[in-house]
Image (cartoon, coloured by chain):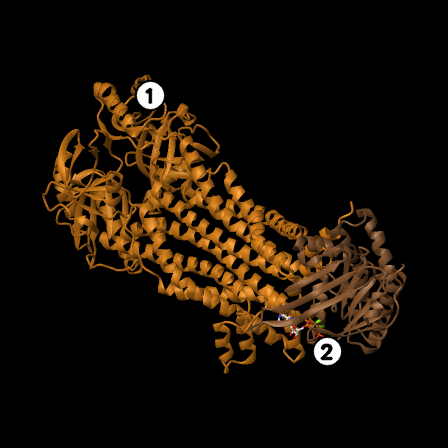
Amino acid sequence: MVLPPRVRKIFRDLGTNYSRTLLVVASIAVGILAIAATLGGRQVLLREFDRDFAQSQRADITYTVSDCSPQVVRRITARPQVASAVGVRIFDASYMVVPDDMDDATALRELSDAGGDTVSLSIAALDAADFDSAEVSHLNRLDTQVWPPGSDDIIIEASATQEYPLAVGDRLLVDTGSGKRVMRISGFVHDINAIPTMFFEEVTAYVSRDALAGLGQADAINTIRVNTTGSRTRAQNARIADAIQDQVLDAQGITVTRMEVPEPDYHFFGNLFAAVSVLLLVMAFMALALSGFLVVTTVSAILVQQTKQIGIMKAVGARRGQIAGLYLGLVLCYGALAVIIGYPVGIGFGNWFIDYAGGILNFQISDYTFPFWVTATLFGVGLLLPALAALIPIIQGIRRPIVDAFNPEVAGVTFGGGVIDRLLGRIRMLPRPTALALRSTFAHKGRLIMTLITLMLASATVMAVFSVGTSLNRTVDNVGGWWRYDAQVILTRVASQRELERLAGGISGVEYAETWLDGRVTIQRPDGTKNDSFWTIGIPGDTHIMHFEFVEGRAPAAGEEAVLVTTDLASAEDFLQVGSTVTLTVNGQDVQRPVVGIVTGSLQGATLYMERDDLANLSGVPGNATRVLVQGTDGAVRRDTLAEIKQRTDLQTRLARQLETRLEDKHIPVSSTQTAVEQLELTGSQLGILTTILTIMSAALGLVGIIGLSGSMTLSVIENTREIGIMRSVGAGHASIFGIYITQGLVVGTLSWAAGAVLSWPLSWGLMQALITSLDMKLAYSYSTSGVFFTLGIVWLISVVGSLLPAWRAAQVSIRDAISYE
Amino acid sequence: MGAIRNIRTVDPLIRLRNVVKTYTKGAVPFTALHDVTLDVYPGEFVGLIGKSGSGKTTLINMITGIDHLTSGEIWVQDTPIHTLNENQMAIWRGRTIGVVFQFFQLLPTLTCIENVMLPMDFCKVHAPTERADYALNYLEEVEMAEHAHKLPSALSGGQQQRVAIARALANDPPLIVADEPTGNLDSKTADAVFTLFERLVHQEHKTIVMVTHDKDLAARVTRSLTVSDGVISNDSLYADVDVTG
Ligand SMILES: Nc1ncnc2c1ncn2[C@@H]1O[C@H](COP(=O)(O)OP(=O)(O)OP(=O)(O)O)[C@@H](O)[C@H]1O
Ligand SMILES: [Mg+2]
């Protein structure tokens, strides 16, 4: 096939001006990459989360009951509105890893006294047949050698491996308090409804019913999970739940200690996930804006360079349509190349990010395909956006009279007209090369502005991310100020307040001890439905440990019968307002309590606080508690940063260990211990997820910035080839030419940084507002001034890196090139 | 002078009537052409001379339609080019005028032969498969056939200008307009290019309007027009023109 010369010209332009081609293609491709990671990442994460969650068949109703037989489950299953039901036994335990060179018998005898690391376990014992039942609380098999597990096998929820190095075949000494047994890890499963280990430092595990006896557990069910038929609202599920309780459980004399009917789409990560998704959306928007500017700048600059050639072609008879077609074709070729390169790279990067985020948020990605509209956006950014960007310069180019096309004054560089130019012209002290660098920076106002905007958006994002990070750290510090304990121990069952306080107070180094009570309370909504998916904690009215951050109201005084709720609970149940009265069901009894205050949540989950003795009385355990919290020396002093609190790590760890031993000596069963440092690190790691994701994304945007700067400078080198040659001919060495371009880059970088600093304030504030809304948590806001200066460092780095290639190119220009340059 | 023209038996190829060109882009509007009226006949080799800044390029740009006139009329063959829109102008120019520039203005990414084929391509002259043969013929005519597949950057100035002339001939236009085509060439090369123009007038019966500063070359045209301060101050006919061709 014979290609007409004009088409050949296009391909020749692509091939011979490879640096321009590379530039445009890189600009478009990096935009595609950034959008793929942010927008594609977000949509796939949302979709896969929903899919994984839907597939898990999370129970619509969960009863915590007194020990009963599987017979009951069968009765529940038989009910018309029940799709399926499953009975399990859930109990707390702990494990120690058995070293390879130790046999089981030795481990049983000696390991617990060796004083190694103990990790909390929450074990669910399932009927062997239920391991494959997908109908309620489906487990996703990842790597399972024995399935269903045998009586000495234990299956671990995969999120544990992020925190602890566990592998199939490892042996664990499992201790339930009433029995010890060495069990072999026979596989891993994924359970989206299990709270990932990193959040509460607790490993979720699954065993078969056969293992119960060996672990000293009764072979009985204590938890019943039910799925209702069809898709129902929470209120409808709650009515079914009540009916089951009345007609099956109560009728059989089974005590229901807790009934959970969650919102059908409620997931404990919902808030965090919403926050991640909002952040990704903001970042996607920034990526879109950034790459939009970049593509427009680059494409129009390339076309401006063609002004003269357009003139020549018109002079030899080309019509406007032909020229427009030619250049649109060229731009489409650039776009197609960029898509060919940027699309797979973007998908690769997006998938890496999806894997990473899916990993920390503990859900499985089974399909990485971007939704069609995201792919369409990527192709749009790759093909349509450049074409649109090209339209203006193309129209300008073909409208320009041929005479002007040959006139460099009109076609390209103008310097000397504007205010800035005159100002720059007046600065006399500058060395010539610097003056030249400054003047050529300002020669192309339009492109300078576009480059500034691109870099400004990038640096504003980086600065905003710094501020978000600082604000989140400040929030963690604040949380540290709210809970002023050093160590706490949570019991598996209630114990006498007085005895706990006495035992704790007797430990050397403990200055103060306080006991709290964890309760089980259900809230009745005005419409008659119930909510019990929140924590209930009874705290003494004269607490020294808890320093609430009040949004409104106050805490119940000693002996006062009132409740205090966290912001996340208040926003889930909007009838909970200070001054309103709420009906609680505690221990089967309905009572009325006024709401006296709302406090900031701390990512621990929605919580209802009551006065400890009020809760103890209602729960039928007067004088008892489930937690003991202690302060060591200076424990009550407010410490302002996590770093300061961390200085007490050793003290806290010692107190926790002594407290635990002390209680176990008195046969008070301990469920878990926690130090304040651990609790803060936990909150920190949850909020840290957000900072990490933001940092990854801002790095992608920074890349767009580098390419943007590099591109715009390369264009300026190409355009100024003749000037560079002239400078060479009057004695400028490599170093001076190099210096001019690096200076140019630094000037542009610094200007963008200054503009970005201004923009970063509202941007970071907006990001924090978005986080506050999605996390239902009051977050501290603190603009990071040090981040602004740190960003200046990054921007300078970006500027130098971005200018290196163009500067090198400029230094390569020979006088001969410059003179023969067309 | 007028008497000579009156005996011509054919219509003029180019007719300028009261052409005024005022540049308005500068701070003060500047009138570069004042009421120019001129006829150019087929087969003439017209040399435009005059001091720098007198308005030669401006006049040339009016004839080629590269720039717009402020008032007056320009007819080429029977086309009132002052009424054409940009697109009509492009098509008309591509088929009617071959333009030669002082700085050659070849497209740097196209080889010589491709540069010559470009006007044919735009104006759809000749079948696509035949264009290369025609282009090679034109290159032979300017003695550049052996360089057909080189890029312009590999050629000397005189060679580039010859390729530019071949490009101007590509659509076989009756009129060739050149603005200082020898201005950037040494005298020997300039002489060769000029000889080429003479051959085009005498053998191919082209009409040429050319600006030149070179006194020696200016003496070899058939008609010499002197431009000063935007008017044609002198019009000398040196040779009879064979209009029968
Ligand atoms: N775009 C323009 N805007 C304003 N004035 C112009 C423009 N182009 C040319 N002129 C002025 O018009 C006058 C004629 O210019 P022109 O280029 O036609 O001269 P010329 O005879 O071709 O000169 P030279 O021999 O130097 O090429 C000059 O005084 C010039 O300053
Ligand atoms: Mg001129």
Q: How crowded is mark 2: few (under 14 residues within 10 Å), some or many (20 or more)?
A: few
Q: What element does badge 2 sit on?
A: loop
Q: Which amino acid does label 1 sit on?
A: Val
**Nearer to us: label 1 or label 2:** 2
Q: Which residue is drawn at 67% across and 70% down?
A: B33
Chain B colour as displayed: brown
Picture quadrant where residue A564 is located? top left
Residue toward you, A165 or A77:
A77
In the image, is the residue at mark 2 within 8 Å of ligand 1 by its beta carbon?
yes
State the separation of the CA atoms marked 1 and 2. Answer: 103 Å
Q: Which chain is orange?
A: A
Picture quadrant where residue A756 is located? bottom left
Residue toward you, A267 or A170:
A267
Q: Mark 2 points at which residue?
A: B51
- A526 sits left or right of A765 in the view: left
Q: Where is residue A424 in the image (x, y as percent from the top left)?
A: 50, 76
- Residue B231 in view: yes
Picture quadrant where residue A147 is located? top left
Ligand 2 quadrant assignment: bottom right
